[in-house]
Image: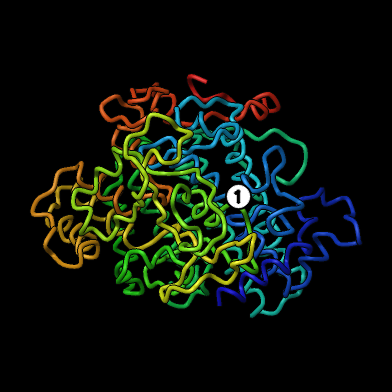
Amino acid sequence: MKRIFTYSIIASFLLIGACGKNLNQSPRYGLNAEAVYSDADNYIKVLAKLYTGMSMTGNQGPAGQADIAGIDEGFSAYVRVLWNMQELPTDEAICGWNDPGIPDLNKSEWNADNVWVKGMYYRIFYQITLCNEFIWQSRDEKLNERGFSSGEVSSIVTMRNEARFLRALAYYHAMDLFGNVPFVTEEDRVGAFTPNQIQRADLFDYIESELKAIENDLTPAGAVAYGRASQSAAHALLAKMYLNAKVYTGTERNTDCATYCEKIINTNVFQLDDVYQDLFLADNHTSPEIIFPIVYDGLYAQTWGGTTFMICSALGGSMVAADYGVNGKWAGNRATGPFVEKFVDSTLDSRWLFYTDGQQLEITSMSTFIQGYGNPKYKNKTKDGLNGSNNATTAHVDVDFPMFRLADVFLMYAEAKFRSGDESTALTYMNKIRERAYGDASHNYSSLVLQDFLDERARELNWECTRRTDLIRFDLFTSGDYVWPFKGNDVAGIGISSKYNLYPIPTSDIVLNPNLQQNQGY
């Protein structure tokens, strides 16, 4: 199923290339939005483009017709820029490259002209624009005008709800990373205008309302095609929002977080994978744990971002690329000492996947790959030890990125219950994670303190784009109470300004849109 879906994605690229244009113009080759959307068979092809907005970088695979200008196409993949924004400014990763903007993320010295800040911001709003157009074209009155059958309408309405989920996910990342942002919906037609800015708490309310409006109309998790959004995907996103609600709105929503975690748990569709490493392999689409993946395929969905980046950037030193199913070592990302030291029982915890041969734990030079332990968590190998589908000279990988998975739901549920005063339930779900990690109950918690949840999330979810958000929720991202190498551009690490809890809106948007106010301190 994974291969079929990704193939339809590639086939759809040329079809929808005109959909972002002014609808009063006629695109080249006589193709326009009305022609595309008048055929019910085309909606799934356009929807595929919305999903690939999360994985691919343009309309011609890894290079050519890039979606986002002003940044190298390989750098512009949604998951790659999200990973850089969520991991590089934290204790979980440090990068040896001197590409523009990378050292600034490691040192917490970014500004409104940082290329990665701009890349993330414009990737998010490109995705939102694509979703808005699909939602507009699939509204009820349009479907009625086009004379589709009841079966076709039902199918398209489900797709419309998926597009609303994808838009909500993009807005969630905008809210989390940038705070107060420009706000557009399907009612704001494509053209030259300056959107108003929505306040972070109001955006939270909007995303919540969108997800609640569609949660029961999405396909149930047990029936959804792999790679597409289910009811449980919407519930997972709501749970993430509620867990961090105090950061976004000033009001805790732990009870709501627990409620939506329970909705996922009670489906009984998902189970913890028996082997932790299997979640990050080339055949992880077979995992019973992944709730919503970003799909990659070494043959049919190629990009230099995504999991190809995650694997190759983590290889260097004495590592052998072939052991990880690829043919290149990019010698970039590795783990810092304070993060590695969270693994107290390294020889027993199956999540200890660090590479130490020839590596030293202490980091005094960002550019020296052998400083810091390697963290080759993702591998383009199957559970049977076979290579992924593409192992050529310019190999791309089959590993899907687990945007939402059950272990995260268990950890959110445990933390929300603990914060609400229910330590017994929190212990049960924390220990489910520990038992998978250690293979038995020998390292289970007998009691909990709040710090345990942050540390367990670090061990379980490392390099999965959660760390910055988690540290902010625990008031440790900018604080001097917890530091790591090069935080604040100090070798040992120092506290930094609280302004860095948000990224700035790019200068180019501030200049062009008088309705926007820059985040404080930038």
Q: Between 266 and 92, which is closer to the camera in this rendering?
A: 92
Dot 1 amino acid type: Ala
Q: Between 412 and 305, which is closer to the camera in this rendering?
A: 305
| Residue in view at x 45 percent, y 43 percent | 204
Does 365 appear above or below 88? above
Q: Is residue 358 left or right of residue 59?
A: left
Does 40 appear above or below 368? below
Q: Between 124 and 340, which is closer to the camera in this rendering?
A: 340
Q: Where does the N terminus fall, quadrant-wise?
A: bottom right
Kindly identify which residue carries mark 1: 77
Q: How is the image coloured?
A: rainbow
- Residue 232: % across, % down: 41, 65
| Residue in view at x 42 percent, y 76 percent | 384
Q: Is residue 397 left or right of residue 243?
A: right
Specify whether residue 185 is in view.
no
- Looking at the rendering, which quadrant does residue 251 occupy? top left
| Residue in view at x 49 percent, y 74 percent | 224
- Residue 498: % across, % down: 39, 24
As drawn, the residue found furthest toward the top would be 521
Secondary structure at badge 1 equals: loop
Specify whether residue 1 is in view.
yes
- Residue 174: % across, % down: 52, 41
- Residue 113: % across, % down: 61, 27
| Residue in view at x 33 percent, y 25 percent | 492
* Mark 1, other Cα within 10 Å: few <14 / some 14–19 / many ≥20: many
